[in-house]
Image (tube, helix red, strand yellow):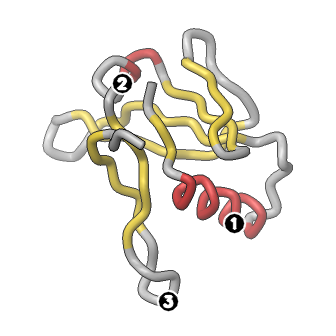
Amino acid sequence: MLKLTETAANRIEEVRRGQGLPESFGVRVSSAAATDGKMALQVAFSDGPVQGDQVAEQHGTQVFVASEVAEPLTDAELDVEGAAAEGVQLVLRPQEDH
């Protein structure tokens, strides 16, 4: 299953609190159509999983991974890059063995 790094989980929780969303909300990773016709990933806050989602709690954050992207993301981890002052972005990379 897609993994969140601790840094990504902390940043996601900061954003959730900043948006005034309840602690019960998690983050859902799903597919979205890109302008070039390819598939893109969408990461959004959600009050719960959709039927068929993979569900896990990672570093205190609920993670819901849509079935259509679960297999391609099995060995990936979601992390953050950049400093808060410059703007932080989520990035996907291969999972590291810890």
**Residue of label 3:** 85
Left or right: residue 65 compared with residue 73: right
Residue 96, numbered label:
none
Foreground: disc 2 or disc 3: 2
Label 2, label 3: how many angstroms apart (C-alpha)?
31 Å
Q: Amino acid at mark 1?
A: Glu
The answer to whether 3 is drawn above or below residue 71 in the figure is below
The answer to whether 80 is drawn above or below residue 46 in the figure is below
- Name the residue: 75% across, 35% down: 47
Dot 2 or dot 3, earlier in sequence: 2
Residue 74, numbered label:
2
Where is residue 35? Give x, y as percent.
21, 46
**Residue of label 1:** 14
Q: Give residue 57's quadrant in the image.
A: top right
Label 3, label 1: how many angstroms apart (C-alpha)?
14 Å
Most distant residue in the bottom direction: 85
Left or right: residue 9 compared with residue 61: left
Mark 3: few/some/many CA within 10 Å (<14, 14-19, 20+)? few
- Name the residue: 40% across, 21% down: 70
Label 2, label 1: how many angstroms apart (C-alpha)?
25 Å
The answer to whether 86 is drawn above or below residue 65 in the figure is below
Where is residue 88? Give x, y as percent.
45, 72
Dot 2 or dot 1, earlier in sequence: 1
Where is residue 67? Give x, y as percent.
45, 16
The answer to whether 88 is drawn above or below residue 33 in the figure is below
Most distant residue in the front direction: 98
- Name the residue: 27% across, 41% down: 94
SS at circle 2:
loop
